[in-house]
């Protein structure tokens, strides 16, 4: 019994620890993307539309249903001693006609290819929807990290200002400083508390935006973000390499290409409609209870109104030219956006590196020197406060540069249609 009791207690002791070790939603970007991929209803709707479009491919090239016609001839039995009847064996004759309409050669293949192009557009729309959604989640997560990082920075600065106030009070108590220095430190703390209130509001808004993208109630709690994604290397951000990937994988370009193919096949179909369709049939005739004769038939439609067909052909040509022009314009805009995002990402990365390696160490040295001078009475409190503000400003600039780099990275991945 003791062994069993110890085993149960040990298991209960392990359970909360295991649960605590599991990362909560919001702690990292990967968990948010996985959740959105599984639960976003708009993405699910796009997948169903793909399935529906794929199911339209086979019917597009199918032959129309055959037609069976039954004709009862001389149901009054004129000239005989029989009474009128509707039974096939009791009338003058019964003809059974089985007909099948057949489109002109190649028309069914064109209809199938048009349906395949429409299915490709639906597939591209799924990729485009996911690229847009993932980009928004990445940007919102980066903003969420920026806000929570600003909160941590404000709390640390508030603690530092509290310490400075205590130093100022000590100096004032010993007659080494002025009361104004204590008041200035208290005013700075009040400003920081006001800033924290604004940051709490921004944190709530950031969580609401993320929850909306995840299709969750806006007030649902999210874990604090732990870290940002490491930026890609310079080799991965080579413009020529990214341009090739964009041309090959961008969802909007894939949709535009599928539309161009659809327009091209629609134009070919419009020209094919110049030729007539035809119907073939076989017609056995029943007399009494036996089939006496067999007939064959061929029926052609007459493409008489060529003016209408010419208008449809010109329409198809114009739609094909329009799809090509839109595809070119879209590609030019995508390449311009890629170039802009690459330059902005590189600038943000270099700015963050400059702040980390030079500006922050310099601001820290300035603050330490000012603090030492203030404690010894050689530096005014205003100089010390300004040195502390320089550190705060540098760290805020560092966070902002990191945010800008993450936003531009998300935009690049949206353009490429891949991680």
Image (cartoon, rainbow, N blue to C red):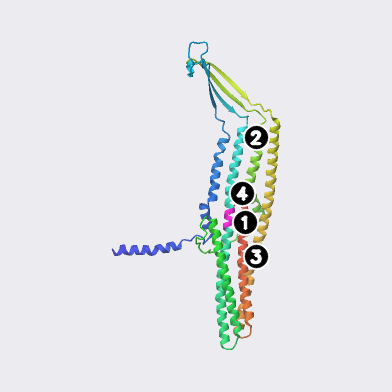
Q: Earlier in the sequence, mark 4 or mark 2?
A: 4
Spot occupied by residue 73 in the image (x, y as percentages of width and height): 53, 17
Which of the 4 image quadrants contains residue 235?
bottom right
Q: Which numbered mark, 4 or 2, is in the foreground of this view?
A: 2
Kindly indicate whether the residue at mark 1 contacts the one at mark 2 (C-beta within 8 angstroms).
Answer: no
- 144 left or right, relative to 10: right
Instruction: Residue at 64%, 48% (x, y): give it.
Output: 253
Local packing at callout 1 (Cα closer than 10 Å; few below 14, some 14-19, many 20+) is many
Locate the C terminus and report the quarter of the image it occupies. Answer: bottom right
| Residue bearing the label numbered 1 | 411
Near-viewer residue (377 or 360): 377
Q: Earlier in the sequence, mark 3 or mark 4?
A: 4
Kindly indicate whether the residue at mark 3 contacts the one at mark 2 (C-beta within 8 angstroms).
Answer: no
| Residue bearing the label numbered 3 | 350
Q: Would residue 74 be counted in the magenta stretch? A: no
| Residue bearing the label numbered 2 | 269
């Amino acid at each position: 019994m003791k062994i069993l009791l110890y085993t149960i207690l040990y298991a209960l002791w392990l359970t909360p620890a295991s649960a605590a070790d599991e990362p909560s939603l919001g702690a990292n970007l990967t968990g948010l993307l996985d959740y959105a991929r599984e639960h976003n209803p708009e993405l699910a709707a796009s997948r169903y539309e793909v399935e529906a479009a794929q199911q339209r491919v086979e019917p597009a090239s199918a032959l129309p249903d055959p037609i069976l016609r039954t004709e009862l001839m001389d149901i009054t039995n004129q000239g005989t001693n029989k009474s009128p009847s509707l039974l096939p064996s009791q009338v003058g004759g019964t003809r059974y006609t089985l007909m099948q309409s057949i489109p002109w050669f190649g028309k069914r293949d064109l209809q199938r290819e048009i349906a395949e192009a429409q299915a490709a557009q639906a597939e591209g729309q799924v990729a485009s929807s996911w690229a847009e959604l993932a980009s928004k989640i990445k940007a919102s997560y980066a903003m969420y990290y920026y806000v929570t990082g600003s909160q941590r920075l404000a709390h640390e600065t508030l603690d530092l200002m509290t310490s400075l106030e205590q130093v100022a009070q000590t100096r004032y108590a010993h007659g080494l400083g002025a009361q104004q220095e204590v008041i200035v430190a208290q005013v700075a703390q009040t400003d920081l508390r006001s800033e924290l209130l604004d940051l709490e509001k921004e944190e709530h808004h950031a969580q609401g935006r993320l929850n909306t993208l995840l299709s969750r109630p806006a007030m649902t709690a999210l874990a604090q973000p732990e870290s940002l994604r490491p930026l890609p290397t310079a080799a991965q951000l080579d413009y020529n390499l990214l341009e090739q990937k964009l041309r090959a994988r961008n969802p909007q370009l894939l949709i535009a290409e599928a539309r161009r193919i659809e327009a091209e096949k629609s134009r070919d179909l419009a020209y094919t409609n110049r030729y007539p369709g035809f119907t073939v049939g076989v017609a056995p005739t029943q007399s009494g209870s036996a089939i006496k004769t067999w007939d064959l038939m061929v029926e052609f439609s007459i493409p008489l109104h060529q003016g209408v067909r010419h208008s449809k052909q010109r329409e198809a040509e114009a739609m094909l030219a329009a799809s090509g022009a839109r595809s070119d314009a879209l590609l030019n805009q995508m390449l311009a956006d890629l170039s802009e995002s690459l330059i902005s990402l590189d600038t943000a990365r270099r700015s963050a590196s400059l702040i980390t390696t030079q500006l922050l160490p310099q601001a820290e040295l300035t603050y330490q020197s000012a603090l030492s001078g203030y404690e010894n009475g050689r530096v005014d409190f205003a100089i010390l406060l300004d040195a502390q503000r320089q550190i705060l400003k540098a760290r805020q600039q560092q966070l902002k540069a990191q945010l800008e780099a993450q936003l531009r990275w998300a935009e690049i991945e949206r353009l490429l249609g891949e991680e």
